[in-house]
Image (tube, rainbow, N blue to C red):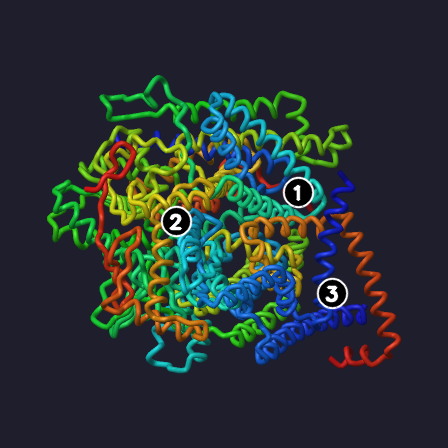
């Protein structure tokens, strides 16, 4: 019994470590290629959004995969984070000249704000189930989009001013600058996000999510997902644990929003609509529910895919839709799954043979980690 | 059936396995894996591009690569396609001339989204673009303008009319009127021609273009002795029902309804006003142009509608007629609107400026940017196009051309 | 009088939402999946009718029938190709596939029919008039609105009768309760699900034609937002419940128009969705939804 538990724990730890290793290796390889000028400009421009989407996918996975609640409004938290972060970064421009410090503070502000909204939304709605929760989160996302669309924020020497509905209500003194201009969104953002910042945020996200999942609380969340009634009957508080996952996820989405928002000189609230929420959900489902590594890979690949399909010109989005359907069919149809499993087993067998031939050193290395 | 499905799955499998294979080789680097995907996808296109460049060089003429960005899919596809085809007409005309400058033209989709617009811009960079033509819509254009300003590319937008696009950026120019300019012009026009004093406005408060015009209009109206009796809004075209807005204008007793919106929702408003038997004067901005060309549109709804459009598709001068003819060949019969004409003029403006600046093949995009900026802001530089003659630009990138208002009579534009 | 006008606008908009929501709820009730492609089937239906009437000059009735027939076939084809292979898969996988189908339909329509908006012909007219005026022209009701409301009530009544009385309808209800047990009772579950999609898609075609008759702009993305709104309406009323979808759709339309008329146009969407959240917090399974059975 005890050894069984120990082995399981070690398996979790190893899985987490592999995830860190993958992300670090990816970062190192991209940086190395970049230094050699081997990365096309089109891919280079996508590095930061890819990091943001990875964080979005991993954080949504915490709600959808680990906690088992369908959320269709994750982009709403990203939006709150992004605009909070933009205002924070602009407001601190004079006080803190160092870009990375401002970016970090903006991310903290964005995460706190989004987390706060996660709490406000989560407390009343988490007692809803299934599709009803889904529709409430969808409604939340639409509300955020609607409000951001009529929000005007500016800054002058007296501080930050906020107005709603019409730009003429935003009265700034001479020398004041508008930061958010309603439907035009945030204008004149100083770009602060870098690939390295994105990479660090991904690591932090992995650290937070994996430790939460592997903790006592994480096991409680999983238990509630798998059998709520049984879990409740042994005294686990549904609200507490579901809320823990939900708020953590919202805060991380907020941080991702800051990373995303500060990567562009202009950002409109329209970006964070239902389609973006769905896009992130696609990453999670395609990567596998509760599978953190899957989320990372799916987010990266599916962000690049539409760009890779640019050669199809007019047929690009059609091709994207077809690929999406085929991949979903291929990964979820039982017949196909068996076929996949058989192929993978064969591939694994070949690898095992290869490793056995090359000796025990590889295995030993794995244990040390 | 089963066999077909199985085949389909097998095909998908091969794709998936290829991806897995890459994954293993690269030590699980996902980003890198995607990069190789992009490369393999780009093979065919890349080769043909290379061929083009060589062809351009061998004729001895200077080759100028213009890269366009705009929405070809999604909600705003109609506007992006218009700018795409409109510019294509000009490119074909210029390349057919005995000119020293040959233009290579490529247009990328931005789905009316900032992130995708940056992606489009980056992929144009990979194509060694010289000049950026776009974006079609304001919000994506703002994101791209920040990049082109930092990277030093010359950028000319056909239709991103927000002043935020050009503000503080010396490299970004517009060929369309700015939003505030249109709002002020509309107020003056209505007052000077004594069309009405009680005005209602219906605008799209989720759209930067519409909000920009409205705010300038609302600020200018009192100065012109106009009374705005009703202001109502809608958010994009997501709610097809405009009955509340129309009734609001009606019950406020507005004699004229100002519609600073695009023609698609405007056509719905015209219909719903007729449905409730409300017949005020309607006045639109340049986004209204195109309303007559919609397939199946009841032209009687637009009778008497006034709009400020720089482009008159019913003009009979040779250039307009040729343009419409060539455009419809590209667009599969869709009629051009002012977006298309703006696009056409953009290419000619770039071409004229490039000729004036003496662009040559040895110049980097930074050099071209500097040369074109000084050509555009030169006091002697002016361009004649479909949307105005003698267009000039100031250093802030805004165009100066004569505003034209037309009224629709018997299904065509008549100058007012 | 403007109050009455608003009520009428709300009911006619709500009826359109209700017809779409009825399709949503049928499919959800039996197949237990959120068919996000439903809104795009609406768009296809409207395009088919548009081309039949405008381009081929067919009589409007033929156009509507053609739209219904083609959408029914399309719905069954989608079910056969995209959803049936995933019968055993987790419901989210089917949801994502539905989203893929939705993207596919939108982009195929964009390529095939172009991005330029089409204006739907006004064919619900009597003589030259498209509506009746009451109270000396102060209140005007279009024939489209009347037809929509009548169609909506008829469809709801028809569906209730169908699921309550006919053999096929009973089979549907059995499948909705317990697929395994239904199969053991000799019900062909696959055929039943296929039939459900056929009915849902036929309703989508009707909704598409009526929607575009009332609000006449037709674009490849026309169906997506009404689809989401109708999905909201179906959940609002209690998803899976036929009278619930009807009630939810109607209320959503009325709330939307009233919010615009009396509260705020800028915040209309936010307020409508906030009302929805509040209602669901008070009644967590929607207005007429069944209580979720807790199985231990």
Relative to C222, residue B210 above or below: below
Q: Position of residue A328 (x, y in %)?
A: 67, 50
The one of A106 and A27 positioned closer to us in this rendering: A27
Q: How many marks?
A: 3
Q: Position of residue C146 (x, y in %)?
A: 39, 24
**Quarter of the image with the N terminus of chain C in it:** top left
Q: Where is residue A338 in the image (x, y as percent from the top left)?
A: 80, 52
Is residue A237 visible in the rendered structure shown here?
Answer: no
Circle 2 crowding by C-alpha within 10 Å: few under 14, some 14–19, many from 20? many
Residue displayed at 35% across by 37% down = B268
Is residue B411 visible in the rendered structure shown here?
Answer: yes
* Callout in the foreground (3, 1): 3
Residue that sits furthest to the top in the current view: C127
Image quadrant assignment for residue C104: top right
The one of B108 and B331 positioned closer to us in this rendering: B331
Secondary element under disc 2, as helix, strand or loop, is: helix
Q: Badge 2 sits on which subunit?
A: C
Image quadrant assignment for residue A117: bottom left
Q: Badges 3 and 2: C-beta atoms under 8 Å apart?
A: no
Q: Where is residue C148 in the image (x, y as percent from the top left)?
A: 43, 26
* Callout in the foreground (1, 2): 1
Q: Badges 3 and 1: C-beta atoms under 8 Å apart?
A: no
Q: Name the residue under label 3.
A: B21
Q: Mark 2 points at which residue?
A: C270
Residue displayed at 39% across by 71% down = B359
* Callout in the foreground (3, 2): 3
Circle 1 crowding by C-alpha within 10 Å: few under 14, some 14–19, many from 20? many
User: Which disc, if any, is residue C82?
Assistant: 1
């Amino acid at each position: 019994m005890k050894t069984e538990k120990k082995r399981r724990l070690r398996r979790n730890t190893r899985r987490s470590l592999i995830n860190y290793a993958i992300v670090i290796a990816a970062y190192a390889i991209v940086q190395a290629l970049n230094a050699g000028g081997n990365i096309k400009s089109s891919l280079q421009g996508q590095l930061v959004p890819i990091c943001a989407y990875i964080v979005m996918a991993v954080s949504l996975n915490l709600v959808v995969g680990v906690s088992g609640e369908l959320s269709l409004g994750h982009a709403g938290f990203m939006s709150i984070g992004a605009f909070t972060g933009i205002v924070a970064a602009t407001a601190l421009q004079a006080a803190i000249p160092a870009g990375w410090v401002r970016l970090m503070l903006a991310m903290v502000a964005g995460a706190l704000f989004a987390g706060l909204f996660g709490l406000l939304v989560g407390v009343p709605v988490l007692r809803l189930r299934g599709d009803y929760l889904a529709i409430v989160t969808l409604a939340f996302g639409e509300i955020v989009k609607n409000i951001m669309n009529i929000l005007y924020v500016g800054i002058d020497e007296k501080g930050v001013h906020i107005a709603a509905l019409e730009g003429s209500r935003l009265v700034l003194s001479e020398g004041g600058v508008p930061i958010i201009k309603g439907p035009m969104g945030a204008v004149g953002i100083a770009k602060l996000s870098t690939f390295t910042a994105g990479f660090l945020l991904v690591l932090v996200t992995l650290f937070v999510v994996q430790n939460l999942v592997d903790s006592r609380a994480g096991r409680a969340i999983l238990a509630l997902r798998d059998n709520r009634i049984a879990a409740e009957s042994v005294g686990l508080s549904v609200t507490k644990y579901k809320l823990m996952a939900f708020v953590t996820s919202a805060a991380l989405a907020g941080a991702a929003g800051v990373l995303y928002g500060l990567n562009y000189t202009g950002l409109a609230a329209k970006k964070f609509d239902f389609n973006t929420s769905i896009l992130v959900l696609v990453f999670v489902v395609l990567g596998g529910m509760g599978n953190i590594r899957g989320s990372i890979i799916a987010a990266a690949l599916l962000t690049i895919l539409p760009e890779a399909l640019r050669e199809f010109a007019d047929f690009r989005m059609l091709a994207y839709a077809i690929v999406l359907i085929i991949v979903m069919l291929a990964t979820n149809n039982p017949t196909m799954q068996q076929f996949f499993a058989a192929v993978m087993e064969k591939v694994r067998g070949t690898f095992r043979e290869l490793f056995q031939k090359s000796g025990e050193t590889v295995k030993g290395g794995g244990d040390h980690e | 059936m089963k066999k077909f499905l199985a085949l389909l799955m097998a095909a998908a499998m091969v794709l998936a396995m290829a991806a897995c294979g890459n994954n293993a080789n690269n030590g699980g680097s996902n980003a890198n894996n995607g990069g190789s995907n992009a490369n393999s996808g780009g093979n065919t296109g890349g080769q043909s591009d290379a061929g083009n460049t060589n062809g351009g060089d061998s004729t001895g003429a200077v080759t100028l690569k213009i890269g366009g960005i705009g929405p070809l899919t999604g909600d705003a596809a109609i506007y992006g396609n218009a700018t795409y085809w409109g510019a294509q007409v000009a490119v074909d005309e210029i390349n057919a001339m005995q000119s020293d400058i040959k233009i290579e033209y490529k247009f990328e989709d931005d789905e009316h989204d900032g992130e995708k617009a940056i992606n489009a811009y980056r992929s144009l960079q990979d194509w060694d673009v010289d000049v950026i033509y776009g974006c079609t819509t304001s919000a994506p254009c703002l994101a791209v303008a920040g990049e082109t300003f930092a990277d030093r590319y010359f950028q000319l937008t056909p239709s991103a009319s927000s002043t935020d696009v050009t503000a503080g950026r010396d490299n970004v120019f517009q060929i369309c009127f700015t939003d505030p300019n249109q709002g002020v012009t509309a107020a003056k026009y209505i007052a000077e021609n004594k069309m009405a004093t009680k005005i209602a406005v219906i605008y799209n408060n989720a759209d930067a273009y519409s909000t920009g015009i409205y705010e300038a209009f609302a600020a200018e109206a009192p100065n012109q002795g106009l009374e705005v009796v009703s202001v109502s809004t809608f958010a994009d075209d997501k709610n097809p029902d405009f009955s509340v807005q129309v009734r609001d204008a009606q019950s406020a007793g507005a004699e004229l309804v100002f519609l600073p919106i695009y023609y698609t929702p405007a056509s719905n408003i015209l219909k719903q006003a007729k449905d409730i038997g409300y017949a005020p004067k309607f006045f639109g901005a340049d986004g209204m142009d195109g309303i007559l060309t919609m397939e199946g549109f009841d032209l009687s709804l637009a009778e008497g509608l006034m709009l400020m459009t720089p482009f008159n598709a019913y003009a009979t001068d040779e250039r307009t007629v040729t343009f419409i003819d060539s455009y419809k060949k590209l667009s599969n019969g869709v009629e051009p609107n002012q977006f298309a004409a703006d696009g056409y003029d953009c290419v000619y403006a770039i071409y004229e400026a490039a000729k004036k600046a003496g662009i040559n093949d040895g110049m980097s995009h930074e050099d071209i940017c500097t040369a074109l900026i000084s050509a555009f802001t030169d006091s002697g530089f002016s361009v004649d196009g479909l949307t105005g003659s003698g267009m000039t630009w100031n250093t802030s990138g805004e165009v100066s051309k004569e505003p034209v208002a037309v009224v629709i009579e018997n299904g065509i534009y008549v100058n007012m | 009088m403007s109050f009455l006008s608003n009520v009428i606008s709300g009911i006619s908009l709500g009826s359109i939402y209700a017809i779409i929501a009825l399709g949503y709820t049928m499919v959800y009730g039996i197949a237990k999946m959120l068919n996000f492609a439903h809104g795009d089937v609406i768009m296809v239906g409207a395009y088919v009718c548009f081309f039949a009437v405008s381009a081929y000059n067919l009589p409007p009735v033929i156009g509507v029938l053609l739209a219904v027939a083609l959408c029914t076939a399309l719905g069954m084809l989608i079910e056969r190709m995209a959803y049936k292979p995933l019968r055993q898969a987790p419901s989210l996988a089917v949801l994502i596939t539905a989203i893929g189908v939705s993207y596919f339909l939108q982009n195929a329509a964009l390529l095939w029919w172009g991005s330029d908006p089409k204006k739907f012909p006004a064919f619900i007219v009597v003589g030259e008039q498209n509506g009746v005026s009451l109270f000396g022209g102060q209140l005007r009701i279009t024939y489209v609105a009347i037809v929509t409301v009548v169609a909506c009530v008829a469809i709801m009544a028809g569906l209730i009768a169908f699921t309550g009385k006919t053999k096929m309808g009973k089979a549907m209800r059995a499948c909705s309760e317990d697929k395994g047990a239904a199969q053991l009772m000799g019900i062909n579950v696959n055929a039943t699900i296929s039939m459900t999609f056929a009915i849902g898609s036929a309703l989508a075609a009707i909704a598409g034609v009526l929607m575009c008759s009332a609000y006449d702009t037709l674009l490849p993305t026309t169906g997506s937002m009404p689809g989401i709104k109708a999905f909201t309406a179906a959940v609002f009323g209690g998803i899976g419940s036929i009278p619930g979808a009807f009630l939810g759709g109607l209320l959503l339309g009325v709330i939307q128009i009233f919010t615009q008329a009396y509260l705020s146009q800028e915040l209309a969407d936010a307020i409508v969705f906030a009302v929805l959240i509040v209602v669901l917090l008070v009644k967590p399974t929607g207005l007429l939804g069944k209580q979720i059975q807790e199985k231990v």
